[in-house]
Image: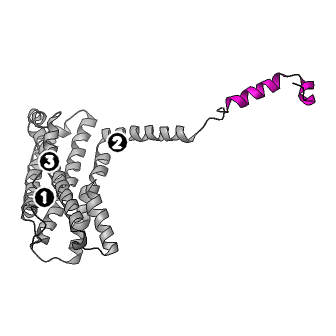
Amino acid sequence: MLMLLFHGLESGVYNFTGEMFCPNYNFNYVTGSFGAALFALETSANIFLAIDRCCDFISPKLCEFLFNGKRITFWIGYQSYSIESTVNLNDYINPVTFWYNMFLTFGFPIIYLIYICFFIYRLREIKAIVDVSQRKWKITMFIQVAIICGINIACCSLYAIMQRLPMSKTLIIVGYYLNYFVFGLPPFIYLFCNETIRNDVKKIIGKELHKLAKKLYSPPNSIHPSYNSRMQRSVNRPLASRFSGGN
């Protein structure tokens, strides 16, 4: 989601204001380095997600050994080299980014093809699962990985081609929007496909709304104590003294 601040918000502000790279090259260099690192992190996480699903089909024990518990932090922390050595470059193309996108362009289809083959091979076993929720989870996980990997494949392919071959304005705009979808759609895909995440989000939102309601709502009996004591003394006084003003 942080990537949207660089690719979406920053690019949009520059387009509206007409800013270029040269007047703010230090700022653009820092944000570009963070953006490249986040892009590598996100795409690497998607590759490991596909590998995790493949391992789950091939051998659940292998999947548990590689991705269970705190081991996932190692895979999430892994990312490719993304920071340029200098800003004084005559070439616009970053060779590391190009080869990384080429790897993603071919790596995603190969890994996902293996995943599809194992899914089809074990489709009868999945259909034979008595537990309906477990069978539904297998199918929704397949859809989840298919959507995420498909968007990444299309985005990386267009970006790699864009750096080497002339492209139409329409394809360039499609590539930019796919880039936004790569970082913006996964949370909604996880919410749609994962019931556990949906329930957790409902609980978190429910707690926050409850806290906000308690702050905004003040009970009607929360009257100042001194006012309550004066009213009580007035009620306890005889009726004649109330109108006569006696103490």
Q: Nearer the viewer, residue 184 or 146?
A: 184
For the stretch drawn in magenta, the main secondary structure is helix
Specify start and end residues of the magenta stretch as a single range. 223-247
Q: Which of 198 and 37 is in front in this view?
A: 37
229 left or right of 185 in image: right
Q: Which residue lies furthest to the front in this view?
A: 247
Q: In the structure shown, which secondary structural element does the residue marked by tag 2 occupy?
A: helix
Mark 2 neighbour class, 10 Å CA radius: few under 14, some 14 to 19, many 20 or more: some
| Location of mark 1 (residue) | 83
* Residue 243 x %, y %: 91, 30
Task: Estimate the spatial distance between the alpha carbons at disc 1 and disc 3, rounded to whole Å.
Answer: 26 Å
- Residue type at tag 1: Ile
Quadrant hosting residue 13: bottom left
x 26%, y 65%: residue: 177
The residue under label 3 is which amino acid type?
Ala
Q: Tell me the quarter of the image containing the C terminus.
A: top right
Give the residue type that dot 2 points to. Arg
In this view, 184 is above or below 206:
below
Q: Nearer the viewer, mark 1 or mark 2?
A: 1
x, y percent for residue 105: 10, 60
Is residue 227 found inside the magenta-colored segment of the image?
A: yes
SS at circle 3? helix
240 inside magenta stretch: yes
113 lies above or below 14: above
Q: Can I make out residue 194 in this image?
A: yes
